[in-house]
Image (spheres, helix red, strand yellow):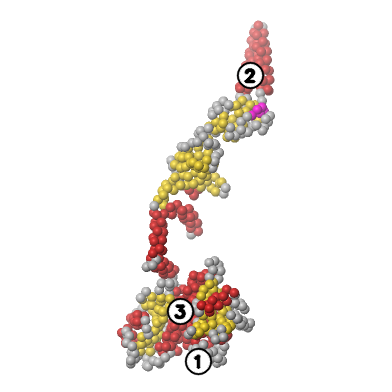
Amino acid sequence: MSTNPRDNEPQPVPGDAAARFGDAAVWRRLLSSDSLESFSSAWLEIFCAEIDLALGPLIGRDKVVYQAMVALGDPETNKYARTGSYGGEKEASLLLAKAAERAMQLRRGTVQRDDTREVPCQLGHPIMVGERLRGVVAIELAPGARDHLDHAMRLAQWATPWFARLFQPGHEVVPGTRIDALEIEAVRLAGAGQTASGAAEALATNLGARLNLRKVSFGVRRHLQTKLLAVSDGGFASVLNDYLSVIVSAMDEAADSDAPIFYPLAVGALARPHAAHARLCREHECDWAQSVSATVPWTRLQDARLVLTAEGVGTPPESTERTLETVLTAVAPIILARLRAERSFPTHLGESVRYVWHRNFAAGAGARRWLLIASAGVLAFISMVPVPYHVSAEASLEGVVRRALVAPFDGYVADATARPGDRMTAGAVLARLEDRELRLQKNDLQARIAEAQKQISEAMGDRDNAKVNILTARLDQAQAELNLVQDNLGRTQLTAPFDSIVVSGDRTQSIGAPVRRGDTLYEVSPLDDFRVAIDVPQADFGDVDIGQAGNLLLSSVPYRSFAFVVERITPIASAREGKTTFRVEARLVDKDALMRPGMQGVANVSVGWHPMIWIGTHHIVDWLRIKLWAWLP
């Protein structure tokens, strides 16, 4: 395929789709086109605005079409050239050109989309006149439109016949030739206005004035019911009274017969149901009434029908029926696309649910049906059947008793043999303090006591009672000091008070170091009596209670778990690793010889029975509840 870019071609400016669709300058270019290039450029701008208008609300963005092109040519020579472009690019992208070539090769609409949802998708549709390929239109859409390519394809199917008319005998575009102004004006009005009903009302009023009709009405038929959409000349279509109900009955009659209906019947015409149209002529005091309808796909399950009913006086022109059908065929996909985009969220949700139900439970959907039934069963199980719920938290082993061995007096470390983790029997020596000064003090005090006793004996021989009393007091003082020194000599060795394990303290590297009275030299705990310290997160603290059972899995003994029972809850919070936790203490039921104080692991506390869906979502629900309480006034 060859391209023929035009450097001076005006490019569209992104903006409101309705404003671009109703731009009078673009429509004037279309009406006054004297070449294929001019007509293709104007048509492409209107077509891209129509797609933006129809698909924009569905994907939540104003601009859906990134780039588009039209190529026309002669099927006899098999040469085609680009006659129109959209999107500001002088050259079509490679993917867009591939989409156009593929559509021309297959002679049917084609789509290109990647599994990645961030990549744009391409759509191509051939321009056919009978069995002859006269060109192709290709558009590149935003990634969000990949789920709505069927809607874009329908719009292309309805729009490409405009090109087909150009190549029919007697309709080639030559200087001075114009397209049917009424049809183009109807398409422009169908895309204008704020709502679909407003556009339909403007279109009905314009048709009534251009064709000299008394009244023109539009209705939409869905689910075997017809809703009046708009009435010409500002009729109140939303207030259904007796005057308007006869119009709805006539529309129902035309939709049920699936064919144009004209009353009164012409001589020799095929008889069709016409009672409602006859009543319409009587009630509205008109000479004739005519209804035409057009069917457009609404959802993936059903179609919608747009019905046009016209009333007039006098004798209608013979071309009225063909004109109404042509106009309705052109505007039906636009109006219905806008109505589909204006659906409320509950309506859209209901139609999606009906589609899923029909797709999975209709005939021929056996595998999907059983899959959905199984999924519903699983969902019901996890929503209703309670299972054990466990609160998991980090835990560590602690000795029930933790005895501190402190320095009994100021001195120096003479010897130390114990280290953390050593198992000690009752009475085993852990360390020894230097006792040389104590022994010297003992010898000195013993000499002073002997001297005092000798002096007391001499004073008693001299009958000096006062001196005896003084010397007796000094003797008692020296004896007390001797008792204290002897007591300290008995405590120079630090011994294990019971069969225990050294938890902390290592004096083997500090022989000769000074210590002060009261300094902790070692900490020991019993060998077989432990408790579990559990750091419960604050989000789960309210579920834990005294008496609940659980299991502890230690990192150093991962092949078995140990049962415990919660005995104490400490309602004091502490921060650990950026998390707020509460301390819970538990008593071990199962014990093992490999257990040591300080071992860490994970504890599961059984706090009750709840459905699995509650277990998986209650933290999120609680967080949302707190946030909503904080945000809402």
Image vertical order of residue 427 relative to residue 598, above or below: above
Of tags 1 and 3, which is closer to the observer? 1
Mark 3 residue crowding within 10 angstroms, few (<14) / some (14–19) / many (20+): many
Rounded to the nearest whole Å, what is the CA distance between mark 2 and mark 1?
139 Å
Residue 597 pos. (x, y %): 54, 37
Q: Specify the amino acid type for callout 2.
A: Leu
Of tags 2 and 1, which is closer to the observer? 1
| Disc sitting over residue 170 in the figure | 1
Residue located at (48% from left, 40% from top): 562
Q: Determine contact: label 2, label 3, CB under 8 Å.
A: no
Helix, strand or loop at label 1? It is loop
Residue 377 or 325: which is nearer the viewer?
A: 377
Of pointers 2 and 1, the one earlier in the residue sequence = 1
Q: Specify the amino acid type for callout 3.
A: Pro
Helix, strand or loop at label 3? It is helix
Rounded to the nearest whole Å, what is the CA distance between mark 2 and mark 3?
116 Å
The range drawn in magenta is 410-416
Image vertical order of residue 398 relative to residue 137, above or below: above
Residue located at (44% from left, 46% from top): 607
Q: Quadrant of residue 378?
A: bottom left
Q: Specify the amino acid type for callout 1.
A: Gly
Mark 2 residue crowding within 10 angstroms, few (<14) / some (14–19) / many (20+): many
563 magenta-colored: no
Residue located at (42% from left, 84% from top): 232
Mark 1 residue crowding within 10 angstroms, few (<14) / some (14–19) / many (20+): few
Residue 314 seen in render: yes
